[in-house]
């Protein structure tokens, strides 16, 4: 049985009729950018997440860099970010001219709160926390540290739609919660899309103005903004998926539960969820000291896997200018050498799950 790491077509097929009806409705409406669908999605998403405002944007990266821009963080400033995040988090900081300062992750692959304080300097302006692989970070400690040092707190929730820490949704703890709706995300669109959650009225207005060339009123531009508008088609399709998000999330949690119960191979280190947090299992990541051998073995059985992520941002060519060398973040670097994401997706059949479990147990 051939099993791919992800099957976005399955998620579409699950509610195909609803998506097709919504797409036709938007196409026939004659209004394609920033209209009723975007407004409807923003209201519904903010309500579901427990935030005062949602502002739809064109991508997750836009949500991140525009967040630092409207918070006034740029050249000369430092932002603390975890070493093992997706590189887009880091770009959100550096696009504005600010410097990313890397912190090691803990055993849950999230930012280790115990290692933040040693990185704070007079130039530190914010903490960017990524809820990696779908698991909420230890937000009580991180919020307390941000308060204690007067730092802004931005959350990268591209992988954590509906994940919570002590009952509170990720994306609502800090100044800005940044979301991606890239097709492979748990709440995926059918193209690029993103959004921010904010509680502050003025900040929400800043995002609305910035995403539309810095204008509140057409052709009256207050600031040098950008074009980062969520389109009506994506917003409409996202409303459909949002209405099924609990069920989509439950399904992923059930697949993860089976993996955790039925995988027992001493060569694999299984993921754990920290007390107080939930995971929405955007990825199911195992660790293996013989990863290359494992990948080749699974390939032979036609089981596809992905590495999230093979090169940590501080060692990427793009961030060579920061001057970090191998060995600078030993935990991050070890994870990059050992992590492997096994198949998990909406519409994954019991047989496919069994096939993955049997293969991994026989490795
Ligand atoms: C996907 C992702 C992003 C970027 O989102 P895009 O919509 O692709 O720009 C940012 N951060 C993390 C952690 C992601 O997984």
Image (cartoon, grey):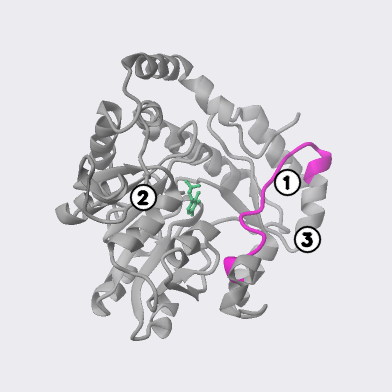
Q: Nearer the viewer, mark 1 or mark 3?
A: 3
Instruction: Tell me which segment is drawn in magenta.
Output: 298-314
Rendered residue at 54%/43% (across/down): 256
Residue 360 tag number: 1
Relative vertical location of residue 339 with respect to residue 195 in this rendering, above or below = below
Relative vertical location of residue 330 with respect to residue 305 in this rendering, above or below = below
Q: Which residue was labeled with disc 3? A: 290
Main secondary structure along the magenta-highlighted residues: loop
SS of the residue at dot 3? loop
Mark 3 CB near ligand 1 (8 Å cut): no
Mark 2 CB near ligand 1 (8 Å cut): no
Relative vertical location of residue 52 with respect to residue 119 in this rendering, above or below = above
Please tell me which of labels 1 and 2 falls first in the chain. Answer: 2
The reply, left or right, for residue 361 in relation to residue 173 is right
To which quarter of the image does residue 140 belong?
bottom left
Residue 23 seen in render: yes
Please tell me which of labels 3 and 2 falls first in the chain. Answer: 2
Q: Are marks 1 and 2 in contact (CB under 8 Å)?
A: no
Percent coordinates x, y for residue 277 in the rendering: 38, 56
Relative vertical location of residue 155 with respect to residue 105 in this rendering, above or below = above
Q: Are marks 1 and 3 in contact (CB under 8 Å)?
A: no
Residue 226 tag number: 2
The residues tagged by marks 3 and 2 sit, at their Cα atoms, a distance apart of 46 Å
Rendered residue at 34%/71% (across/down): 126
Q: Nearer the viewer, residue 361 or 193?
A: 193
Please tell me which of labels 1 and 3 falls first in the chain. Answer: 3
Crowd class of label 2 (few under 14; some 14 to 19; many from 20; radius 10 Å): some
Q: Nearer the viewer, residue 358 or 149?
A: 149
The residues tagged by marks 1 and 2 sit, at their Cα atoms, a distance apart of 47 Å
Percent coordinates x, y for residue 212 in the rendering: 30, 44
* Image quadrant where one finds the N terminus: top right
């Amino acid at each position: 049985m051939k099993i791919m790491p992800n099957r976005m077509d399955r998620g579409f097929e699950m509610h195909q009729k609803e998506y097709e009806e919504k797409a036709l409705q938007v196409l026939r409406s004659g209004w394609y950018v920033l209209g009723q669908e975007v407004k409807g999605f923003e209201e519904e998403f903010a309500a579901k997440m427990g935030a005062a405002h949602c502002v739809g944007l064109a991508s997750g990266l836009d949500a991140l860099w525009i967040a630092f821009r409207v918070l006034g963080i740029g050249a000369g400033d430092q932002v603390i970010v975890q070493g093992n995040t997706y590189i887009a988090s880091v770009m959100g900081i550096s696009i504005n001219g600010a410097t990313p300062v890397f912190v090691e992750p803990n055993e849950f692959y999230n930012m280790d709160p115990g290692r933040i304080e040693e990185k704070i300097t007079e130039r530190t302006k914010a903490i960017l926390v990524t809820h990696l692989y779908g698991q909420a970070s230890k937000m009580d400690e991180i919020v307390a540290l941000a308060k204690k040092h007067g730092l802004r707190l931005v959350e990268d929730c591209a992988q954590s739609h509906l994940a919570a820490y002590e009952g509170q949704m990720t994306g609502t703890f800090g100044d800005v919660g940044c979301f991606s709706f890239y097709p492979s995300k748990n709440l995926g669109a059918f193209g690029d899309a993103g959004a921010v959650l904010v509680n502050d009225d003025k900040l929400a207005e800043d995002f609305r103005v910035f995403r539309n060339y810095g204008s509140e009123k057409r052709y009256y531009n207050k600031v040098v903004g950008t074009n980062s508008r969520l389109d009506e088609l994506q917003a409409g399709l996202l409303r459909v998926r949002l209405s099924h998000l609990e069920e989509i999330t439950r399904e992923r949690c059930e697949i993860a539960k089976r993996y955790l119960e039925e995988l027992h191979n001493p060569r694999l280190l299984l993921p754990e969820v920290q007390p107080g947090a939930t995971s929405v299992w955007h990825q199911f990541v195992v660790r293996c000291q013989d990863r290359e051998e494992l990948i080749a073995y699974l390939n032979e059985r036609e089981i596809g896997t992905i590495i999230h992520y093979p090169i940590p941002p501080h060692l990427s060519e793009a961030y060579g200018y920061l001057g970090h060398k191998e060995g600078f973040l030993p935990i991050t670097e070890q994870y990059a050498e050992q992590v492997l994401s096994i198949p998990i997706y909406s519409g994954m059949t019991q047989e496919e799950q069994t096939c993955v479990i049997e293969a991994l147990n026989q490795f």
